[in-house]
Protein backbone atom coordinates (compact mmCIF):
# COMPACT_ATOMS: atom_id res chain seq x y z
CA UNK A 1 0.00 0.00 0.00
CA UNK A 2 2.82 2.36 1.01
CA UNK A 3 4.68 1.47 -2.19
CA UNK A 4 1.57 2.24 -4.25
CA UNK A 5 1.15 5.62 -2.55
CA UNK A 6 4.83 6.45 -3.18
CA UNK A 7 4.52 5.41 -6.85
CA UNK A 8 1.39 7.56 -7.19
CA UNK A 9 3.17 10.56 -5.67
CA UNK A 10 6.18 10.15 -7.98
CA UNK A 11 3.87 9.81 -11.01
CA UNK A 12 1.94 12.92 -9.94
CA UNK A 13 5.12 14.99 -9.55
CA UNK A 14 6.41 13.76 -12.94
CA UNK A 15 3.09 14.70 -14.52
CA UNK A 16 3.31 18.20 -13.02
CA UNK A 17 6.83 18.59 -14.41
CA UNK A 18 5.59 17.52 -17.86
CA UNK A 19 2.55 19.83 -17.82
CA UNK A 20 4.51 22.77 -16.37
CA UNK A 21 5.91 24.16 -19.67
CA UNK A 22 2.41 24.13 -21.19
CA UNK A 23 1.10 26.76 -18.77
CA UNK A 24 4.26 28.91 -18.79
CA UNK A 25 4.41 32.13 -20.89
CA UNK A 26 5.41 31.87 -24.54
CA UNK A 27 9.08 32.96 -24.82
CA UNK A 28 9.67 36.42 -26.31
CA UNK A 29 11.53 36.39 -29.64
CA UNK A 30 14.50 38.75 -29.41
CA UNK A 31 15.50 38.91 -33.12
CA UNK A 32 14.14 42.25 -34.37
CA UNK A 33 12.70 43.15 -30.95
CA UNK A 34 13.17 46.65 -29.48
CA UNK A 35 14.85 46.47 -26.06
CA UNK A 36 15.26 49.59 -23.92
CA UNK A 37 17.91 49.35 -21.19
CA UNK A 38 18.09 52.13 -18.61
CA UNK A 39 21.55 52.22 -17.06
CA UNK A 40 22.73 50.59 -20.30
CA UNK A 41 26.00 52.53 -20.50
CA UNK A 42 27.80 50.63 -17.73
CA UNK A 43 28.06 47.42 -15.69
CA UNK A 44 25.14 45.00 -15.62
CA UNK A 45 22.96 47.17 -17.90
CA UNK A 46 25.62 47.32 -20.61
CA UNK A 47 26.08 43.53 -20.45
CA UNK A 48 22.29 43.05 -20.72
CA UNK A 49 22.29 45.27 -23.82
CA UNK A 50 25.16 43.24 -25.33
CA UNK A 51 23.37 39.96 -24.57
CA UNK A 52 20.15 41.17 -26.25
CA UNK A 53 22.08 42.60 -29.23
CA UNK A 54 23.88 39.28 -29.71
CA UNK A 55 20.45 37.70 -30.01
CA UNK A 56 19.35 40.12 -32.77
CA UNK A 57 17.55 42.85 -30.80
CA UNK A 58 17.51 46.60 -31.55
CA UNK A 59 18.70 48.52 -28.51
CA UNK A 60 17.95 51.87 -26.88
CA UNK A 61 20.44 52.77 -24.17
CA UNK A 62 19.31 55.26 -21.53
CA UNK A 63 21.67 56.98 -19.07
CA UNK A 64 22.84 60.50 -18.24
CA UNK A 65 26.47 60.77 -19.34
CA UNK A 66 26.67 61.12 -23.16
CA UNK A 67 30.33 60.09 -23.50
CA UNK A 68 29.72 56.88 -21.57
CA UNK A 69 26.66 56.19 -23.73
CA UNK A 70 28.63 56.60 -26.98
CA UNK A 71 31.45 54.43 -25.67
CA UNK A 72 28.97 51.69 -24.72
CA UNK A 73 27.24 51.97 -28.12
CA UNK A 74 30.59 51.31 -29.87
CA UNK A 75 31.25 48.32 -27.64
CA UNK A 76 27.78 46.84 -28.18
CA UNK A 77 27.93 47.31 -31.97
CA UNK A 78 30.91 44.95 -32.13
CA UNK A 79 28.46 42.13 -31.34
CA UNK A 80 26.01 42.68 -34.21
CA UNK A 81 24.63 39.61 -35.98
CA UNK A 82 23.16 41.50 -38.95
CA UNK A 83 23.68 44.91 -40.58
CA UNK A 84 20.14 46.13 -39.83
CA UNK A 85 20.64 46.27 -36.05
CA UNK A 86 20.70 49.70 -34.42
CA UNK A 87 21.89 51.00 -31.05
CA UNK A 88 20.20 54.27 -30.10
CA UNK A 89 21.51 56.41 -27.22
CA UNK A 90 19.34 58.67 -25.11
CA UNK A 91 20.67 60.91 -22.39
CA UNK A 92 18.16 61.53 -19.62
CA UNK A 93 17.92 61.27 -15.85
CA UNK A 94 15.24 58.59 -15.30
CA UNK A 95 14.52 59.76 -11.76
CA UNK A 96 13.73 63.46 -12.15
CA UNK A 97 10.82 64.35 -14.38
CA UNK A 98 8.21 61.89 -15.66
CA UNK A 99 7.28 63.96 -18.73
CA UNK A 100 10.94 64.01 -19.84
CA UNK A 101 11.17 60.23 -19.51
CA UNK A 102 7.87 59.79 -21.35
CA UNK A 103 9.15 62.03 -24.16
CA UNK A 104 12.39 60.14 -24.69
CA UNK A 105 10.58 56.80 -24.71
CA UNK A 106 8.22 58.24 -27.34
CA UNK A 107 11.25 59.31 -29.43
CA UNK A 108 12.80 55.85 -29.11
CA UNK A 109 9.52 54.20 -30.19
CA UNK A 110 9.27 56.51 -33.21
CA UNK A 111 12.77 55.48 -34.31
CA UNK A 112 12.86 51.76 -33.44
CA UNK A 113 9.20 50.78 -33.03
CA UNK A 114 7.22 49.83 -29.92
CA UNK A 115 9.21 48.63 -26.95
CA UNK A 116 9.11 44.83 -26.59
CA UNK A 117 11.30 44.68 -23.51
CA UNK A 118 12.17 47.35 -20.96
CA UNK A 119 15.03 46.68 -18.58
CA UNK A 120 15.06 49.04 -15.59
CA UNK A 121 18.71 48.79 -14.59
CA UNK A 122 19.65 52.40 -13.80
CA UNK A 123 20.48 52.52 -10.13
CA UNK A 124 23.02 53.17 -7.45
CA UNK A 125 24.03 52.10 -3.96
CA UNK A 126 25.14 54.13 -0.99
CA UNK A 127 25.83 52.49 2.37
CA UNK A 128 26.48 53.59 5.92
CA UNK A 129 25.03 53.22 9.39
CA UNK A 130 21.43 54.50 9.62
CA UNK A 131 22.35 57.45 11.86
CA UNK A 132 25.36 58.36 9.67
CA UNK A 133 23.40 58.51 6.41
CA UNK A 134 22.04 61.93 5.42
CA UNK A 135 18.26 62.02 5.08
CA UNK A 136 18.87 63.20 1.50
CA UNK A 137 20.53 59.83 0.77
CA UNK A 138 17.26 58.03 1.51
CA UNK A 139 15.44 60.44 -0.81
CA UNK A 140 18.04 60.08 -3.56
CA UNK A 141 18.09 56.26 -3.52
CA UNK A 142 14.31 56.06 -3.47
CA UNK A 143 14.22 58.48 -6.35
CA UNK A 144 16.83 56.75 -8.55
CA UNK A 145 16.19 53.09 -7.70
CA UNK A 146 12.42 53.17 -7.24
CA UNK A 147 10.96 56.17 -9.16
CA UNK A 148 13.66 55.66 -11.81
CA UNK A 149 12.01 52.29 -12.45
CA UNK A 150 8.42 53.53 -12.16
CA UNK A 151 8.77 56.31 -14.78
CA UNK A 152 10.10 54.28 -17.76
CA UNK A 153 7.68 51.41 -16.96
CA UNK A 154 4.73 53.83 -16.83
CA UNK A 155 5.84 55.23 -20.20
CA UNK A 156 5.78 51.85 -22.01
CA UNK A 157 2.97 49.94 -20.30
CA UNK A 158 -0.04 51.23 -22.29
CA UNK A 159 1.46 50.25 -25.65
CA UNK A 160 2.57 46.87 -24.30
CA UNK A 161 -0.96 46.14 -23.05
CA UNK A 162 -2.49 47.27 -26.35
CA UNK A 163 -0.12 45.06 -28.35
CA UNK A 164 -0.59 42.16 -25.94
CA UNK A 165 3.18 41.66 -25.83
CA UNK A 166 5.96 42.83 -23.57
CA UNK A 167 8.47 42.24 -20.85
CA UNK A 168 9.38 44.59 -18.02
CA UNK A 169 12.50 43.79 -16.04
CA UNK A 170 13.29 45.40 -12.70
CA UNK A 171 16.85 45.05 -11.46
CA UNK A 172 16.58 44.87 -7.69
CA UNK A 173 19.37 43.24 -5.64
CA UNK A 174 19.91 40.47 -3.09
CA UNK A 175 19.74 43.44 -0.69
CA UNK A 176 16.14 43.75 -1.91
CA UNK A 177 15.46 40.29 -0.46
CA UNK A 178 17.10 40.69 2.93
CA UNK A 179 18.10 43.74 4.92
CA UNK A 180 21.79 43.93 5.78
CA UNK A 181 23.91 46.13 8.03
CA UNK A 182 24.67 49.43 6.27
CA UNK A 183 21.90 49.10 3.68
CA UNK A 184 18.96 50.83 5.41
CA UNK A 185 18.62 53.28 2.50
CA UNK A 186 19.60 50.96 -0.36
CA UNK A 187 17.65 47.88 0.78
CA UNK A 188 14.41 49.77 1.23
CA UNK A 189 14.65 51.25 -2.27
CA UNK A 190 15.23 47.75 -3.69
CA UNK A 191 12.48 46.12 -1.55
CA UNK A 192 10.08 48.73 -2.95
CA UNK A 193 10.70 47.41 -6.46
CA UNK A 194 9.45 43.98 -5.44
CA UNK A 195 6.09 45.40 -4.27
CA UNK A 196 5.74 47.38 -7.47
CA UNK A 197 6.57 44.35 -9.60
CA UNK A 198 4.18 41.96 -7.81
CA UNK A 199 1.23 44.35 -8.11
CA UNK A 200 2.06 45.22 -11.71
CA UNK A 201 2.38 41.56 -12.73
CA UNK A 202 -1.15 40.86 -11.48
CA UNK A 203 -2.47 43.78 -13.57
CA UNK A 204 -0.67 43.01 -16.83
CA UNK A 205 -0.64 39.22 -16.97
CA UNK A 206 -4.04 39.06 -18.71
CA UNK A 207 -2.48 41.21 -21.46
CA UNK A 208 0.38 38.75 -22.02
CA UNK A 209 2.87 41.17 -20.49
CA UNK A 210 5.32 39.59 -18.06
CA UNK A 211 7.38 41.15 -15.29
CA UNK A 212 10.77 39.91 -14.08
CA UNK A 213 12.52 41.00 -10.88
CA UNK A 214 16.26 40.30 -10.88
CA UNK A 215 18.14 39.95 -7.61
CA UNK A 216 21.86 40.16 -8.51
CA UNK A 217 24.50 39.36 -5.89
CA UNK A 218 27.64 41.52 -5.59
CA UNK A 219 28.78 41.99 -9.18
CA UNK A 220 32.08 43.31 -10.49
CA UNK A 221 31.02 46.63 -12.09
CA UNK A 222 32.14 50.28 -11.94
CA UNK A 223 29.13 50.93 -9.67
CA UNK A 224 30.23 48.18 -7.25
CA UNK A 225 33.80 49.55 -7.16
CA UNK A 226 32.42 53.00 -6.33
CA UNK A 227 30.15 51.61 -3.60
CA UNK A 228 33.06 49.74 -1.99
CA UNK A 229 34.94 52.99 -1.34
CA UNK A 230 32.54 53.96 1.48
CA UNK A 231 31.13 50.61 2.70
CA UNK A 232 31.20 50.14 6.48
CA UNK A 233 33.52 47.36 7.66
CA UNK A 234 30.55 45.23 8.81
CA UNK A 235 28.86 45.47 5.41
CA UNK A 236 32.12 44.58 3.65
CA UNK A 237 32.76 41.54 5.87
CA UNK A 238 29.18 40.28 5.40
CA UNK A 239 29.47 40.80 1.62
CA UNK A 240 32.71 38.83 1.59
CA UNK A 241 30.90 35.69 2.80
CA UNK A 242 29.79 35.20 -0.83
CA UNK A 243 31.81 35.58 -4.02
CA UNK A 244 31.55 38.42 -6.53
CA UNK A 245 29.91 37.61 -9.87
CA UNK A 246 30.84 38.70 -13.37
CA UNK A 247 28.34 41.15 -14.96
CA UNK A 248 28.21 39.02 -18.14
CA UNK A 249 27.01 36.00 -16.13
CA UNK A 250 24.37 38.08 -14.32
CA UNK A 251 23.19 39.65 -17.60
CA UNK A 252 22.86 36.26 -19.33
CA UNK A 253 20.63 34.94 -16.57
CA UNK A 254 18.46 38.08 -16.47
CA UNK A 255 17.91 38.03 -20.25
CA UNK A 256 17.13 34.30 -20.18
CA UNK A 257 14.55 34.74 -17.40
CA UNK A 258 13.00 37.80 -19.05
CA UNK A 259 12.60 35.96 -22.38
CA UNK A 260 10.91 33.07 -20.53
CA UNK A 261 8.68 35.50 -18.62
CA UNK A 262 9.94 34.23 -15.25
CA UNK A 263 8.93 36.53 -12.38
CA UNK A 264 12.04 35.76 -10.42
CA UNK A 265 15.62 35.95 -11.67
CA UNK A 266 18.44 34.91 -9.38
CA UNK A 267 22.05 33.85 -9.79
CA UNK A 268 23.87 30.86 -8.31
CA UNK A 269 23.00 28.59 -5.40
CA UNK A 270 22.87 31.45 -2.84
CA UNK A 271 20.52 33.36 -5.11
CA UNK A 272 18.34 30.30 -5.65
CA UNK A 273 18.10 29.70 -1.91
CA UNK A 274 17.33 33.31 -1.11
CA UNK A 275 14.65 33.53 -3.80
CA UNK A 276 12.93 30.34 -2.67
CA UNK A 277 13.11 31.51 0.93
CA UNK A 278 11.68 34.97 0.26
CA UNK A 279 9.11 34.01 -2.38
CA UNK A 280 6.17 34.94 -0.11
CA UNK A 281 3.14 35.59 -2.33
CA UNK A 282 5.23 36.31 -5.44
CA UNK A 283 3.79 34.83 -8.63
CA UNK A 284 5.27 31.66 -10.10
CA UNK A 285 5.57 31.11 -13.80
CA UNK A 286 5.73 27.33 -13.72
CA UNK A 287 4.37 24.53 -11.56
CA UNK A 288 7.89 23.21 -11.06
CA UNK A 289 9.03 26.52 -9.59
CA UNK A 290 6.15 26.50 -7.09
CA UNK A 291 6.75 22.87 -6.22
CA UNK A 292 10.46 23.48 -5.58
CA UNK A 293 9.62 26.39 -3.28
CA UNK A 294 7.15 24.30 -1.26
CA UNK A 295 9.61 21.43 -0.86
CA UNK A 296 12.75 23.46 -0.06
CA UNK A 297 11.32 26.19 2.22
CA UNK A 298 11.96 24.48 5.59
CA UNK A 299 15.48 23.38 4.73
CA UNK A 300 16.45 26.81 3.38
CA UNK A 301 15.04 28.56 6.46
CA UNK A 302 17.26 26.36 8.63
CA UNK A 303 20.36 27.24 6.56
CA UNK A 304 19.34 30.94 6.60
CA UNK A 305 19.24 30.95 10.42
CA UNK A 306 22.91 29.87 10.44
CA UNK A 307 23.78 32.68 8.00
CA UNK A 308 21.94 35.24 10.16
CA UNK A 309 23.80 33.99 13.23
CA UNK A 310 27.15 34.42 11.48
CA UNK A 311 26.21 37.95 10.27
CA UNK A 312 25.28 38.91 13.85
CA UNK A 313 28.61 37.64 15.11
CA UNK A 314 30.47 39.70 12.43
CA UNK A 315 28.65 42.84 13.66
CA UNK A 316 29.46 42.03 17.31
CA UNK A 317 33.15 41.36 16.45
CA UNK A 318 33.44 44.72 14.68
CA UNK A 319 31.87 46.48 17.70
CA UNK A 320 34.31 44.84 20.11
CA UNK A 321 37.28 45.70 17.88
CA UNK A 322 36.17 49.34 17.65
CA UNK A 323 35.67 49.58 21.43
CA UNK A 324 39.17 48.12 22.02
CA UNK A 325 40.84 50.53 19.62
CA UNK A 326 38.96 53.49 21.18
CA UNK A 327 40.29 52.49 24.64
CA UNK A 328 43.82 52.07 23.21
CA UNK A 329 43.59 55.52 21.58
CA UNK A 330 42.47 57.12 24.86
CA UNK A 331 45.22 55.49 26.90
CA UNK A 332 47.95 56.25 24.33
N1 LIG B 1 27.01 45.70 -9.03
C1 LIG B 1 26.42 45.08 -8.03
O1 LIG B 1 27.06 44.47 -7.16
C2 LIG B 1 24.91 45.06 -7.96
C3 LIG B 1 24.31 44.11 -7.14
C4 LIG B 1 22.91 44.09 -7.06
C5 LIG B 1 22.15 44.98 -7.80
N2 LIG B 1 22.77 45.90 -8.57
C6 LIG B 1 21.93 46.85 -9.31
O2 LIG B 1 22.17 46.71 -10.69
C7 LIG B 1 22.00 47.95 -11.35
C8 LIG B 1 23.24 48.26 -12.16
O3 LIG B 1 24.33 48.32 -11.27
P1 LIG B 1 25.84 48.40 -11.78
O4 LIG B 1 26.67 47.92 -10.67
O5 LIG B 1 25.94 47.81 -13.13
O6 LIG B 1 25.98 50.00 -11.84
P2 LIG B 1 26.94 50.97 -12.70
O7 LIG B 1 28.08 50.26 -13.29
O8 LIG B 1 27.22 52.13 -11.81
O9 LIG B 1 25.93 51.48 -13.84
C9 LIG B 1 24.83 52.25 -13.50
C10 LIG B 1 24.15 52.73 -14.78
O10 LIG B 1 22.98 53.46 -14.43
C11 LIG B 1 23.05 54.77 -15.02
N3 LIG B 1 22.33 55.68 -14.12
C12 LIG B 1 22.56 55.90 -12.80
N4 LIG B 1 21.71 56.81 -12.33
C13 LIG B 1 20.92 57.18 -13.37
C14 LIG B 1 19.87 58.10 -13.52
N5 LIG B 1 19.43 58.84 -12.48
N6 LIG B 1 19.27 58.24 -14.72
C15 LIG B 1 19.69 57.51 -15.78
N7 LIG B 1 20.71 56.62 -15.70
C16 LIG B 1 21.32 56.46 -14.51
C17 LIG B 1 24.55 55.04 -15.15
O11 LIG B 1 24.87 55.99 -16.15
P3 LIG B 1 25.01 57.58 -15.83
O12 LIG B 1 25.73 57.69 -14.52
O13 LIG B 1 25.74 58.15 -16.97
O14 LIG B 1 23.62 58.10 -15.74
C18 LIG B 1 25.02 53.66 -15.60
O15 LIG B 1 24.72 53.46 -16.97
C19 LIG B 1 21.69 48.96 -10.26
O16 LIG B 1 20.30 49.13 -10.16
C20 LIG B 1 22.23 48.32 -9.00
O17 LIG B 1 21.57 48.75 -7.85
C21 LIG B 1 24.12 45.96 -8.68
Image (cartoon, helix red, strand yellow):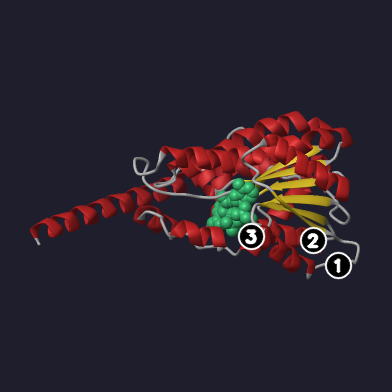
Labelled pair 3, 2 in contact (Cβ < 8 Å): no
Q: Which of marks 3 and 1 precedes in the sequence?
A: 3
User: Any atom of ligand 1 within 8 Å of the CB at mark 3?
Assistant: yes
Name the residue nearer the viewer: 104 or 234. Answer: 104
**Residue 192, position in %: x, y?**
56, 36
Query: What is the CA distance from the residue labelled 1 to the residue labelled 2?
Result: 8 Å
Q: Is residue 142 above or below residue 124?
A: above
Q: Which of marks 2 and 1 precedes in the sequence?
A: 2
Q: Which residue is at a point 67% across and 52% down the rendered structure image?
A: 63
Which is closer to the viewer, label 3 or label 2?
3
Circle on res. 81:
1
Q: Is residue 178 above or below residue 228?
A: above
Labelled pair 1, 2 in contact (Cβ < 8 Å): yes
Q: Is residue 65 left or right of residue 260?
A: left
Name the residue nearer the viewer: 245 or 233. Answer: 233
Circle on res. 53:
2
Q: Quadrant of residue 42?
A: bottom right
Q: Residue furthest left?
A: 331
Amino acid sequence: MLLLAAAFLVAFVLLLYMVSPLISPKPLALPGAHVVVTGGSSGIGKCIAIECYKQGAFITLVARNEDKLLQAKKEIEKHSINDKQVVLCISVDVSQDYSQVENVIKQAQEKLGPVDMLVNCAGMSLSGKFEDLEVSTFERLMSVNYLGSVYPSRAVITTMKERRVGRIVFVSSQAGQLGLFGFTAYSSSKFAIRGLAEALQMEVKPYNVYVTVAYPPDTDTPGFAEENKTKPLETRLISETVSVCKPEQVAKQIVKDAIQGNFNSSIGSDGYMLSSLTCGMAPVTSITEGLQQVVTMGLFRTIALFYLGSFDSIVRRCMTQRAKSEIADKTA
